[in-house]
Every structure is written in structure tokens, then in C-alpha cells.
Image: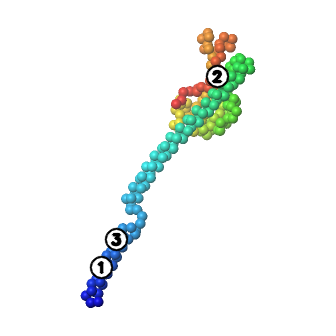
Amino acid sequence: MSRAVVERRRHCIAVRGAGAQQATRATLRGHGQGGFTLFELAIVVAIISTLAILAIDRIWALRMDAERAAVAQVVGSLRSALGLEVASRAVRNGLRSVPELEGSNPMALMAQVPPGYLGELEQVDAALLDGGQWYFDPGDGALVYLVRFRGSFETTLQAPQRLRFRIVLRYEDVDESSRFEPARDRVHGLDLIPMEPYS
């Protein structure tokens, strides 16, 4: 081979080698350091924070919805138990004994009381009890639910936030005296009603 051909090959190899080294250096410079820039990190933190706030807000709303549904389920079960008790008494001895249930403890009619039922408590300071619990106040004839999550219910009662229910007699007031008279008025049944309005 001639000397010129050998020199030309050396020159081509050297040029190719230098280009490969530059490409390798460029690749290492762009990606070799790894990680995020401060700006990229700030963007990622902002996005994650926004998603977390939205998730927490939604979880809070779901907790309040769950509490409302749980109370509605217990009240519905109590109304069903009242209906069964009225039917049972009507079959056994007519509706004469139904009025004695007015103001009584509706939980006594349940086959199984709901979780968080504390029983009958007289003259109790509701502020000392945890939310999410039920109790019966024999003095008022009231079944009381202590609200667990603020904002689940709106009520006219002062703190602590609670709901009160009472068994009332449904009857036809024949002489419009506004009170039940067993000899005249016809009994229709019992109902569990809130003692104060709530939403």
C-alpha cells in the first residue's frame, strides 16, 4: 500500500474517533447527571399537592355521606321494628297497648342494636361522649345520636352536635282535643320522628 493511502485511512479513523468521543461527551453531559432540575421538582411537588388536596376534600365529603347513610339506615331499621311491634300487638290484643310505647326506647325493639349504642343514660353530659354513638335518655324519652363529623348534619341544637328522635303515637284526634284519649281516638300506629329539624 502506498504511504498516501495509509495516511488517509489514519486520518479517517481519527476523525471518526473524535466524532464518537464528542457524541459520547454530549450524551453524558445531557443525561449523565440524572435527577430533576429545581424547576421540574417544584412543578412535580405542586401537582402532587393539588391532587392530595382534591383527594382529601373528596374523602372528607365521602365520610360525611357515609355518616348520613348510617344514621338513615339505623332510623329506617328502628321504624321497621316499630311497625313490626305495632302489628304484633294488634294481632295479640288489638291496638289498646300501642300507646304505652310512646316515648319508650326504640332500641329495645331491635334484635341487634347498632354499633356504638351506649344504652340508657340519664342526665349525661353529651359533650363528654365521643361522636358516632347512640344513647337513650329516659328523662326526655329521646334516642340521641352524637354527630361524628362536623358538617354532616345541620341542627338547631347547641354543641355538641346531635340528633334526637322520639317514638310518637299516630292517631285520629276525633274531638280535636290535641291529646290522645283512648276511649275516643283511633290509633294508627307509631312513628320515630326527629325532635328537632335537621338536614
Residue at the spot of label 2:
190
Question: Measuring 37% from the left and 59% from the top, which residue is drawn there?
Answer: 39
Q: Which of marks 3 and 1 is nearer the N terminus?
A: 1
Per the model, the C-alpha gap separating discs 2 and 1 is 100 Å
Quarter occupied by the N terminus: bottom left
Question: Measuring 33% from the left and 79% from the top, which residue is drawn there?
Answer: 17
Q: Residues within 10 Å of mark 1 (few under 14, many from 20)?
A: few
Residue 96 in percent (x, y) is at: 71, 17
Which residue appears farthest toward the right when viewing the image? 92
Residue at the spot of label 3:
26
- Horizontal placement of 86 versus 19: left or right? right
Q: Earlier in the sequence, mark 2 or mark 3?
A: 3
Determine the secondary structure under disc 3.
Answer: helix
Question: Measuring 48% from the left and 44% from the top, which residue is drawn there?
Answer: 57
- The tally of labels here is 3
Asked if the residue under mark 1 is in contact with the one under mark 2, i.e. CB atoms within 8 Å, the reply is no
Question: Measuring 42% from the left and 64% from the top, which residue is drawn there?
Answer: 35
Residue 165 in percent (x, y) is at: 61, 28
Residue 47 in percent (x, y) is at: 42, 52
Q: How crowded is mark 3: few (under 14 residues within 10 Å), some or many (20 or more)?
A: few
Single out the mark in the foreground, 3 or 1.
1
- Name the image quarter holding residue 186: top right
Q: Which amino acid does label 1 sit on?
A: Val
Q: Which amino acid does label 2 sit on?
A: Leu
- In this rendered view, identify the residue nearer to me: 123 or 23: 23
Which residue appears farthest toward the front when viewing the image? 1
Residue at the spot of label 1:
15
Q: What residue type is labelled 3?
A: Ala
Asked if the residue under mark 3 is in contact with the one under mark 2, i.e. CB atoms within 8 Å, the reply is no
